[in-house]
Image (spheres, grey):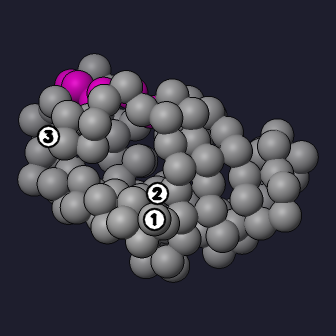
């Protein structure tokens, strides 16, 4: 168990082993976190294991945006991400608002996948 303090707010991680944290998608991307929070997370952990990444639709666009910020932070710091998801990378985004931005996220996820193998 560990907490990270960012801008006076604490982010809680139940499962931490060394420099890797495991948590559910909802606790990371369905809460009001911003890019700054994800940069702090990427600064603390070498990698994340995230469970239950959904397929994104118009109904969960805010979570999709947060997921994009998270992937950007991990990618820029050359961290790893392991995730269980409801679909393949190319099928994760079915919304409209971030369609073009999510193409970059998908590309980064593919590169991170190849980097890890």
Report the front residue among 64 and 7. Answer: 64
Earlier along the polypeptide chain: callout 1 or callout 2? 2
Magenta residue span: 53-58
> Residue drawn at (49%, 35%), measured in percent from left and top?
84
Horizontally, residue 45 falls left or right of residue 59, namely right
Q: Quadrant of the C terminus?
A: bottom left
Judge whether 15 appears above or below 7 on screen.
above
Q: In terms of secondary structure, where does tag 3 sit? A: loop
Residue that badge 1 annotates: 117
Residue 115 at x, y percent in the picture: 42, 71
Q: On the image, numbered disc 3 is attached to which residue?
A: 97
Tell us which disc is closer to us: 3 or 2: 2
Q: Which residue is mark 2?
A: 70
Residue 40 can be seen, yes or no: no
Residue found at x 24% / y 54% = 106
**Would residue 66 be counted in the magenta stretch?**
no
- Assess whether residue 55 is covered by the magenta stretch: yes
| Cα–Cα span, label 1 and label 2 | 21 Å
Question: Where is residue 66 drawn, in percent x and y?
Answer: 42, 47
- Residue at (69, 67) in percent of width and height: 45
User: Which secondary structure lies at badge 2?
Assistant: helix
Front label number (1 vs 2): 1
Q: Who is closer to the viewer here, 11 or 54?
A: 54
Which image quadrant is residue 56 in? Answer: top left
CA separation in Å, label 3 and label 2? 18 Å
């Amino acid at each position: 168990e560990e907490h990270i303090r960012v801008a006076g707010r604490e982010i809680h991680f139940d499962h931490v082993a060394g420099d890797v944290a495991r948590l559910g998608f909802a606790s990371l991307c369905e809460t009001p976190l911003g890019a700054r929070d994800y940069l702090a997370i990427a600064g603390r952990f070498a990698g994340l294991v995230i469970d239950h990444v959904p397929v994104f639709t118009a109904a969960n666009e805010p979570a999709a945006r947060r997921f994009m910020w998270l992937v950007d932070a991990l990618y820029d710091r050359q961290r790893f991400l392991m995730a269980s998801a409801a679909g393949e990378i190319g099928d994760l985004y079915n919304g409209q608002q971030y369609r073009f931005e999510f193409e970059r996220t998908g590309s980064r996820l593919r590169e991170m996948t190849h980097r890890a193998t």
